[in-house]
Image (cartoon, rainbow, N blue to C red):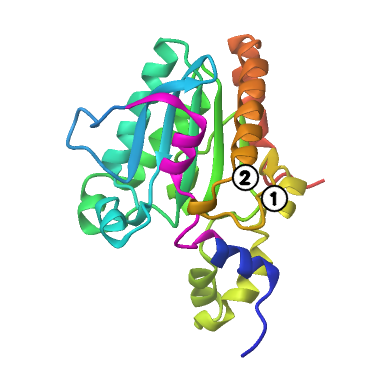
Amino acid sequence: MPSINKSYEKVLRARGKQRPVASDCIAACISDFIELHGDRGCKDDSAIIAGIGYLGQMPVTVIGIEKGHTTPEKIAHNFGAASPEGYRKALRQMKLAEKFHRPVLCFVDTAGAYCGIEAEEHGQAEAIARNLAEMMTLKTPIISVIIGEGGSGGAIGLAVADEVWMFSGAYYSVVAPESCANILWKDMSHADEAAESLCLTADPLLELGIIDRKIEEPENFLKQQVNDEFFNALRIGLYTTFEKLCSKSTRELLDTRYEKFRRVGRYD
């Protein structure tokens, strides 16, 4: 069997069945979390968890794309593939956060948005595009953390943020390596080569300015071995960064966020 390069190794690690998911991160970082349901238009999408809680002493709105661990959990959460209703639910919570001056914290873990017929009929592309536009001008601080898979529009629909952080074992890409290989080579066996070319791991993304911080994971980053020291450091980092962002004027916050994304892809 040919060896697998390090980039594709991390893609496979990001998909690990026992890796902490959004609900684990929320439980570890947020106290007194209350989940809020529904998009007030159609239904509640269980692929996205949204609600309010406390980060230390700071009230925050928290949104996470949830995969689940067991097969019944994965089915219940549609394997982390959110429908338009999920993105609309997330946006509803963001607008409430803006109204009540709460920072927004997003945990992103998805291979991509749900691409079923019903999702397309309900306006999947429009729902994601609206999130991009609204998050760009949301008058409250936003931090998005890529905790596992960060796939395509499904991830970016919750990642237009003042700061984008990424776990060291995660990936963040416009397309999954297998899909890229299928498009370019008509052969998914080139997935490892595609992963290397896509620069989808934390180090090159940090160098390119796509993400703002890499969070180094413990060696065995499993749900049953959730590391208190790791999540304590994450909590402190989030709290400190939100304090810094909250000290900015609304105009400075929005201008900095806009320029951050305008720089993406700029080549000198």
Magenta highlight range: 14-34
Q: What element carries label 1?
A: helix
| Residue, disc 2 | 166
The quadrant of the image that shows the N terminus is: bottom right
Residue 92 lies, with reference to residue 193, above or below; the image says above
How crowded is the residue under tag 2: few (<14 C-alpha within 10 Å), some, or many (20+)? many
Q: Where is residue 146 in the image (x, y as percent from the top left)?
A: 55, 45
Taking depth in this image into account, of 24 and 107 the one nearest to the observer is 24
For the residues bearing labels 1 and 2, Cβ distance under 8 angstroms: yes
The tag on residue 205 is 1
Closer to the camera in the image, 164 or 210: 164
Q: In this view, does 225 lie above or below 101?
A: below
Whether residue 211 appears in this view of the structure is: yes
Point out residue 30 in the picture as x, y percentages from the top left corner: 47, 28
Report the mark closest to the observer, 1 or 2: 2
Q: Residue furthest left?
A: 42
Is 30 part of what is drawn in magenta?
yes
Picture quarter containing residue 115? bottom left
Count of number-bearing discs: 2
Pick the front one: 252 or 218: 218
Q: Residue 33 in magenta? A: yes
* Disc 1 crowd, CA 10 A, few/some/many (<14, 14-19, 20+): many
Secondary structure at numbered mark 2 = strand
- Residue extending farthest to the bottom is 1
Give the amino acid type for the residue marked by disc 1 in the picture: Leu
